[in-house]
Image (cartoon, helix red, strand yellow):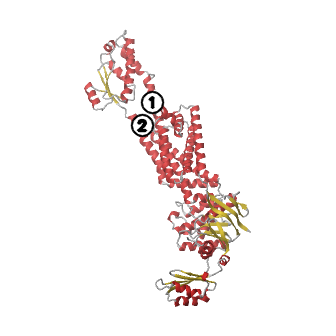
Amino acid sequence: MRKIWTILILHLMAFFKSPGVLVLMFVMPVLFSGIFGGMTMNSEQNKPIVNVVLSDTENSGQILNLLAKDQHYEWKKATRQEAEKNVAAQDVAAAVVIPDDIGERISASKPLLDIIVQRKNESYLALSAHLEGTAGLVLRSYQATSKLDSDAFPKVLETITNNKGVTVEKQTIQKDKQTNVEANLMFVGFAMMFMMFGLSGAASTILEERMGGTWGRLMVSPASKLQIILGYLLAYFFMGWTQFAILMTTMNLMFATTWGNLTYLIPFASLVILSVVGFGLMIAGLVKTKQQASAISAVLIVSTCMLGGVYWPIDIVPELMQKIALGVPQSWAMSGFKEIISGSLHSATLMKDTLALVGFSAIFFFIGLRGIKFE
Amino acid sequence: MNMLTVQDLRKSFGSFEAVKGVNFSVEKGESYGLLGPNGAGKSTTINMITGLFPPNSGEIKIKDIDVIKNPKQAQKWIGVVPQEIALYQSMSARENLKFWGRMYDLSGSELEKSVDRVLEIIGLTERAKDKVSTFSGGMKRRVNIGAAILHKPELLIMDEPTVGIDPQSRNHILETVKHLNGEGMTIIYTSHYMEEVEYLCERIGIVDHGQLIASGTLSELRETIGDHSKIILSIDKESSNLEGLAQSLTGLFSEKDIQIQEQQVMVFHKEPQLILTDFIQSVAKTGTKITSVNIVEPNLESVFLHLTGRNLRD
């Protein structure tokens, strides 16, 4: 055990003394997560503005209140002239006109709300869905109160607005949570990619040591092969965990991110790190020089991270690509992390992800240990 | 008592047979040299003895421990100085020695004492805290040796430990090895520098093309060439009369003891002082101008030349 510990400490010390490795393993993922995480969070804070053109009637005011239930937009009153000018200048995402003649429009089966946009972009599509829903509510409220007093219609609209159980509010809560999960997965993805670069580079030091003679010297010492390889692998494992822990803490401090149930997260992250260590060992076992290892690692890491949903959600890629993604460990790792971080944990899914990663790790270690020359 | 016994050792790399049935033994406290040109099979033999890789066939025993069956048990008794500077360059000399000491089960105050003792032996106490990367080639070689003697091995195996260093560091290393051997440590020393092997080793094995072609003490090996010294007369190329020289010298010496070249005339003889005057006069009579005279005692170089027909550094 003492020999394993000695080798482990030696490599951890070398690791923490190496500026290149520190930048790759800590600075880069924190920087990337900070920049892209910040952008994601800011996109939530910088809501698109929608101008609302309305008359000074109670009905119009209540419809505006109903529209403003969707907090993804900033609803600002404007005159028609101002609104058209703002839309033309792209200062606002769109303008909504609430007409005075609601009753006449309903009778004539005309659209209840007018929308002014310059381009039908993503923002317009989301807004139009909300406008359709609101118009439907207005229509049903008007029909329900058509035989009652004229005050009844705005009162119904007010009641609906004050009702917290309306669909719009519910959707908003779900979307915020989803956004956080996606941002957290992005942090995990960056951590995993840079960990793969860092640890595959670290594992290829075995090749350098073979050339330099220290590997051979270790082999002719009384330390067994098992002790030597365990010393190296445990050092890489601790490097991986240090990186992951630092990234988790930093992101928590910067963006108040949550990481789900630690009881599941810690063992699953350990398994992911183990498979990354195995990947590094496999590269070291397949090539002859550190330069070859760097070149092959770069190609394999970038391509498999793309396939495995590290850079973007795997759900948005074509079905064929999603099937191909099953052949890379990153897709299983991201799926498992998503399960844990989202909080809606399905044991069966997590178990499937875990078993897949165990399989990948076993293959990587088998190839790596067969390839490494213990002489 | 034999410290090391090597019997019929063979090793091939693909179709290339690197070691072809090597046999030798080294007694406790002895210093044994393996001499041979680069690529002769010395390092392959050493690597098999240290247990780095197994032979295809043969037997290796260190203190009666079968190295092939129990390499880790045997490795406790040996110290290995590899040909490469097998050290961590970013670490200090002391850190390196402590690391390698721990690999040989040293710890605590015993480790500290060993490191201090070794730093003194290799003459680097003052530079103990400096990074190895800042050392000269000779200093690195000394730390390389230090890392192998921390645990006071009974058998020290050194594979070309003086390659590429300055004469001063080489002398320091040779003196260190002599000192360690004087303290009772058994030494196996491989080199292609015959002077080092002559100076350090009681017995010498000459290796060529994967075979041990001769083995014995220096005087025993000299005997194989009849213990003849070589008188070399350097001559002026312009004034030399090669035909006249051949006629003049064959009257004095037998033909097999004479070698005439464009700028050198050589005669092999057991007692060079007795024939030196006659030799010089015979050459001078032909009108050839002599520029220098040199008498070379029989050495390992001439033994190797005699045995293989090649120079050691060919």
Q: Residue at x 59, y 50 (%)?
A: A371
Q: Which residue is mark 2?
A: A41
- x and y, in percent, of residue A214 in the image: 58, 59
- x and y, in percent, of residue B73 in the image: 70, 59
* Viewer-nearest residue: A137 or A206: A206
The amino acid type, in three-letter code, at marker 1 is Lys
Q: Is residue B157 above or below residue B292?
A: above
Q: Is residue A331 above or below residue B209?
A: above
Q: Please state if A188 lies on the left or on the right of A368 as rendered.
A: left
Write down the chain letter for disc 1. A
- x and y, in percent, of residue A71 in the image: 39, 28
Q: Is residue A107 above or below residue B252?
A: above
Write down the chain letter for disc 2. A
Q: Is residue A191 above or below residue B181?
A: above
Q: Please state if A48 lies on the left or on the right of B11 as rendered.
A: left
Q: Which residue is mark 1?
A: A175
- For label 1, count other residues whose C-alpha is less than 10 Å away and answer few (under 14), some (14-19) or many (20+): few
